[in-house]
Image: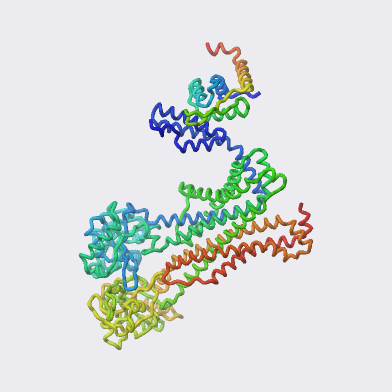
Amino acid sequence: MKSENRRLPRLASWIIKNLLPDYLGDTAVGDYEELYIRQVEQGSVLIARIWLWRQIFSALQFSFFWGVVMLKNYIKVAFRNMRRHKGFSFINIAGLAVGMACAMLIFLWVQDELSYDRFHKDVEDIYRVAREVHQPGQTYHTVYTSAELCRVLRDEFPEIVAASAINGRPRVLFKHGDKVFYEGGLVQVDTSFFEILSFPFIAGDPQTALLDVDSIVITENIAKKYFGDEDPLDKTLTWNNWLDRKVTGVIKNIPANSHVRFDMVINTELMRNSWPEGLQWENKIFRTYVKLQKGVDPEQLGQKVIAAIDNKYPRHSQFKDRIYFLPLTQAHLHAVGGGGPINYVYIFSLIALFVLLIACINYMNLATARSSSRAKEVGLRKVVGSNRGQLTKQFLGESLFFVFSAYIISLVLIKLFLPVFNQIAGKTLTINFFDPRFIFSSLAIVFFTGVVAGSYPALYLSTFSAVQVLKGHVSSGLKGAAFRRVLVVSQFSLSVGLIIGTVVVHQQLEYLRNKELGFDKENIVYIPMKENIGENYQAIKNRLLEDPNILSVTAKDRLPTRPFDVGLIDWEGKDVEQKLEVEFPWIDYGYFETLNMEFIEGRDFSKEFSSDVKDSVIVNEEAVERMSMKSPLGKRITFPSGRISSIVGVVRNAHFRSRQYEVVPEVYRLIPNYNSGELNLFGVLFMKLKGGNITGGISAVENMWKEVNPNYPFEYHFFDAAVDDFYKGEMKMRTLSDYFSILAILISCLGLFGLASFMAERRTKEIGVRKVLGASGGNIMLLLSGEFVKWVVLANIIAWPAAYIALHTWLSNYAYRIKLEWWVFLLSGMLALAIAFFTVSYQALKTARTDPVEALRYE
Amino acid sequence: MKLLTRAEELILLAIWRLNDEAYCVPILDQVQEVSNKKWTLGSIYITLHRLDKKNFVESELGTPTAERGGKSKRFYTVTSAGVEALRATREVEKAMWDGIEGIVYE
């Protein structure tokens, strides 16, 4: 027999030792072991194990029997304490409840954030394709790739099981019978899309759904919208009034925790007819998803891909991209190239921890502060024979009892505030109180809080010596007070840190929002260049300009907030070998004027110069800087197509996209042909309207539209809404972190208030004597408040450097950021000080104004 | 005096019979054998604990032996109060059985 079978399993002997009364401890382990070995010798180890655990399970009853007697007493005492000190109990429980509710809400949020995209089958084999782009003066990361790259990956690498490029389409008009709607959530993908991302099908076959060029897969919601209760399969949806698409599949609505979002899916293939260039190497407008074979190392595959493409496709290799693979599970939280919402997960988890810690510190503070009144109880318990271990257990149990009461209240709070939280966070979180995962994790929080909050009081109170205490030498003195000071200081350090953090985050986001955009977004309306607009562009433009409410009309090949086609350019007088990757927006005359973009040098495109159409370009500041041009005007730029144009103007950088990222170099050209497929797909018409009469301007546009595109319902959009969209996410996070910081500060004030009132109560006699001897109310207030103020000042000194380091790190994620200014720190410190002062002085004032006779008579 | 429960009675008698060897394992064996039923060690501990509180048994730690990996045994002996309780219980039983014994064992 193996020697290990001659002993009890370690866990079993640990349970026996710890759950049975001490006097049985070792002998009981021996008894069990003897019987266990006998069982092992008789038969199999397995049977012996089963026997053993059944034995232990039934023996547990005994330990409960043993504990219940004392437990009843502990609960009784805890209850009495709670009732006798209603104020303290309220502060403790309210603080803990709010803290726990915060922590649990944040926990729910974090759990939801971490659950993104994990519902796909074989999610660990799914990757996104990303590029690290090396440019003169800059390196950046992006997930936008070309459809051609996706094709090469799929066809030439056996390690890649499936690959699909996905690209959002501009709004399209769909019609079925009398139901006509614009749909914005349309994407085009490759046939193998659903092999990679396994969105569940309700009807249709994921394998074949997208094989036909004119097929379309829709979500449940869309199916309901167009077909009601009818079976949508094989029904047709008319696309932009000219093509019938057959519904070949219906998928469940995209879950909230998917980072890929769409309502309708079509095959990319059709783009070969309307805009074939869109599928070439140069047009990096697709995101590519691949499924790798099990066990393939994405790192190695990436290197192989780069080498293979460099050899075979020189047209691509000129871009000098490093292609690599990013796990799908990181798509939501990690921005490509670092940073991203994962920071919020960290920040919020930190806030949750802080809030919980502050609530724990309140409990510890108040419990130790009250130690003198509990000392007699401890003394008496010791006299009648309880040992230190039992007392520790009692006080730990008491704090668990408090925490558990707080937990029940926090559940109610969560239930009440979850809808509000959802609204702020833009989530649809639900809570199922009976979900074992929730029960387990929330009980873990209860246990953590209970043990942390109870640990110091338990260890501290249980050290009292019975003789000393009962003789009246209550050493509630130095040790406890010093420790409380440490606690208050650390609590306020956390609060000050949170205030500073909140202010700086505000400043940064406000800065980003108001940072000179470099363009005007107000009163600008845009409409898509749909159908007949391109064809009749000049006539429409002239007609619209006749209306007094429309100040200017211009066009662009794409909304500036969307990513563009990029290409490599050469330029005159360059001193680096490399080419520069730039965006090539196509624009109409008057574009810069409409958006009020400022020229640094040179001039706008003008009809006076007939050569502008073919031979002139306007570049932005960033492009000039990257090409390191000294005097850009008149310099020549060579396009990938071979066209050579000279620079006639330089415009100031405009921040069309999130200012977390830097501005991209741009080279503007005049639109040569308004009736191209590309313009029809993506082009937009911009109009600057007169501020006083927006509706008048819009109705003029509407009239035009109805005439030109009678088959399409009129649509228009405000440009500022498109720009502000980039900050929606950040704004949500900001509001949330504001609320949580305020709560944290409130909780710590609650604790401070409790502590101050306790101190005042303990010093009633002293204050009485002082007043009798002539101290004024002011003196007393100063006496009581001064002490706390001292600690808060110390807390500031600790919090400042810590906050500085943390915020400095956070800010370095932003390309455009504020400087950390000293006054923010000072102001936050002053604020904390003021809050502490007012909290304490309320109590101090109350005490200072009491009649000394009352105070001295209190015994 | 309170009467003993059946478990208490059985265990007290087992301790008495086992004499010098009365620690938990043989006690368990003994009561299992006599009652022809499975007992758990835990139930033995509970009963012993109750008997101990009523001062019907005394216990002492044996010297540790290599046999149980150095873990000592706790030996129990019946106190005079325990003997008294056994006798009282037995008497009550006897009184109740008096006169019907013959019919039951017919």
Q: Residue furthest left?
A: A312
- The N terminus of chain A - image quarter: top left
User: Camera-side residue: A89 or A23?
Assistant: A23
* Image position of A216 (left or right of A344): left
Residue A217 in the image, given as x and y percentages of width and height? 30, 59
**A819 relative to A446, above or below:** below
Quadrant of the rendered structure where residue A635 is?
bottom left
Vertical side of A462 occupied by B30: above or below? above
Give the residue at x 66% y 62%.
A787
Q: Where is residue A856 in the image (x, y as percent from the top left)?
A: 77, 56
The residue shown at (25%, 61%) is A305
Residue sitting nearer the eye, A47 or A672: A47
From this view, report whether residue A780 is shown above or below residue B76: below
The quarter holding residue A685 reads bottom left
Image side of residue A781 versus residue A639, left or right: right
Q: Position of residue A302 (x, y in %)?
A: 28, 60
Marker count (numbered): 0
Q: Nearer the viewer, residue A225 or A779?
A: A779
The answer to whether residue A237 of the structure is visible from this angle is no
